[in-house]
Image (spheres, rainbow, N blue to C red):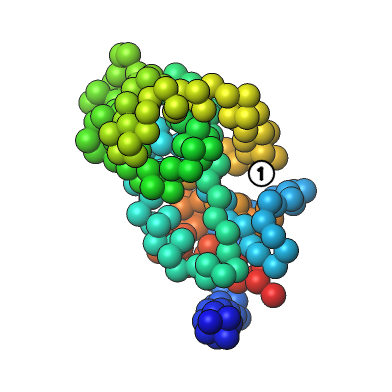
Amino acid sequence: MMRAVSILVTIWLLGAGAASAQSPWTEGQHYFLVRPAQPTSVAAGKVEVLEVFSYACPACNHFYPAIDKLRAALPAARVQWRFLPAAWHPEEDWKVFQRAYFAALALGIADRTHDRVFDAVWKTGELATMDGNQLKSPLPSLADVAHFYESVAKLKPGEFLAAAHSFSVDAQMREADAQIAAYQADSTPTLIINGKYRLTPRSAGDEEQFIALAKWLVGQEIH
């Protein structure tokens, strides 16, 4: 099994190396160096790919299928993905969704519910923040999120709310805000590759270039 994984990673690296030899991307235009580079939380030998996002961000909703496509394309044996929710716009419920993500993560349901929260905000309207071109009033509350998780993950609302208001989630939110500032990320979605490189769909050019550039940058970090 390990030999098969090694062969697959080698093939992926050969493709990344070919792209590197004739890279169409320019540092400072298509992607940016994070200065100073930030530490990662992954094991030695792995590359961290981190997305700064918000469920209430329309661009993040638009690009989440591309993010899923990128995750599937990266070698799982060498790459570890992490989501980091931003909270820049409390008037649009970003803080509520930041808290909701970390609570879901603590409860072990975030992988199953991540895409479904986007759909609840932007497709089904269960957690919508907009009513046409206007902000909804009232905006979704943590209680609304708790009932949503009950319906999709069979999680008791009280269990979710207890996690959402826990000391550990409060600490994770403060740490997320500090990390996002250290990455110099000022828009969503933003990818951070191994604490060293920052890119966005806009800087890359388009969705396909965004995926290709992220794969190329990951390739620079796999040794």
Name the residue rendered at 65%, 71% in the picture: 222
- The disc labelled 1 sits on which kind of residue? Tyr
Q: Is residue 129 above or below residue 101?
A: above
Identity of the residue furthest to the right in this view: 36
Could you tell whether 205 is left or right of 20 in the image?
left
Identity of the residue furthest to the top in this view: 138
In which quarter of the view is residue 43 placed? Answer: bottom right
Give neighbour class at mark 1: few <14, some 14-19, many 20+ (Cα, 10 Å). many
Question: What residue did someone put label 1 on?
Answer: 183
Give how far across and how far down residue 107 sits, in percent: 49, 38
Could you tell whether 135 is left or right of 23 in the image?
left
Name the residue rendered at 62%, 29% in the picture: 168
Give how far across and how far down residue 32 sits, in percent: 64, 54
Towards the viewer: 103 or 19: 103
Q: Is residue 127 visible?
A: yes
Q: Is residue 52 above or below residue 121?
A: below
Could you tell whether 84 is left or right of 221 in the image?
left
Name the residue rendered at 70%, 40% in the picture: 182
Name the residue rendered at 55%, 41% in the picture: 84
The quarter of the rendered structure image containing the C terminus is: bottom right
Towards the viewer: 170 or 26: 170
Give how far across and how far down residue 3 sits, in percent: 57, 85
Give how far across and how far down residue 58 sits, in percent: 36, 38
Q: Which secondary structure lies at badge 1?
A: loop
For the image shown, how many numbered marks are present on the structure?
1
Q: Is residue 33 visible?
A: no
